[in-house]
Image (cartoon, helix red, strand yellow):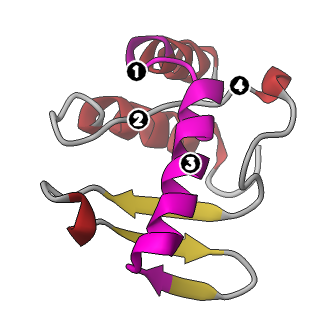
């Protein structure tokens, strides 16, 4: 195990389990066996507002950028839809994280 060792990894996974119970957090895991998926290798944080026009995206790839124009948001909404389709549901994601934490 890399940085911090098994104890730190377990604590991080347990933290994810704790915060994932909050109503405004939707934690999804894309299992390794899924293969390639949209935006693999780049982080995306999608800020979903009450009004879709107020949505924004923080993208981390070759360069970090903040996106808030409608044409760009449409593109990222489609990416997020495909990511969600590839991911486990929230309960199954938490179950997988819990199993991994217990096995460390």
x and y percentages locating residue 24 in the rendered image: 18, 42
Which residues lie in the magenta part?
Answer: 66-92
Distance, label 2 to label 4, CA atoms, is 13 Å
Distance, label 4 to label 1, CA atoms, is 13 Å
The numbered mark at residue 78 is 3
| Label 1 vs 3, first from the N-terminus | 3
Distance, label 3 to label 4, CA atoms, is 20 Å
The numbered mark at residue 90 is 1
Q: Under tag 4, what secondary structure? A: loop
Where does label 4 land, which residue?
31
Is the residue 7 above or below the residue 42 in the image? above
The numbered mark at residue 43 is none
- Mark toward the viewer: 1 or 3: 3
x and y percentages locating residue 32 in the rendered image: 79, 28
Where does label 2 land, which residue?
27
| Label 3 vs 4, first from the N-terminus | 4
Is the residue 60 above or below the residue 102 in the image? below
Q: Residues within 10 Å of mark 1 (few under 14, many from 20)?
A: some
Proximity of marks 2 and 1: CB atoms separated by less than 8 Å: yes
Distance, label 2 to label 1, CA atoms, is 6 Å
Q: Secondary structure of the magenta portion, mostly?
A: helix
In depth, the one of 62 and 8 nearer the eye is 62
- Mark toward the viewer: 3 or 4: 3
| Label 2 vs 3, first from the N-terminus | 2
Q: Residue at x 56, y 15 (%)?
A: 96
């Amino acid at each position: 195990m890399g940085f911090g060792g098994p104890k730190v990894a377990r604590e991080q996974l347990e933290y994810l389990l704790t915060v994932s119970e909050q109503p405004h957090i939707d934690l999804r895991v894309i299992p390794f066996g899924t293969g390639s998926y949209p935006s693999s290798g780049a982080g995306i944080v999608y800020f979903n507002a009450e009004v879709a026009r107020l949505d924004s995206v923080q993208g981390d790839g070759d360069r970090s950028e903040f996106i808030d124009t409608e044409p760009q948001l449409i593109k990222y909404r489609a990416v997020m839809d495909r990511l969600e389709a590839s991911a486990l549901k929230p309960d199954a994601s938490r179950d997988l994280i819990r199993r991994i934490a217990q096995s460390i």
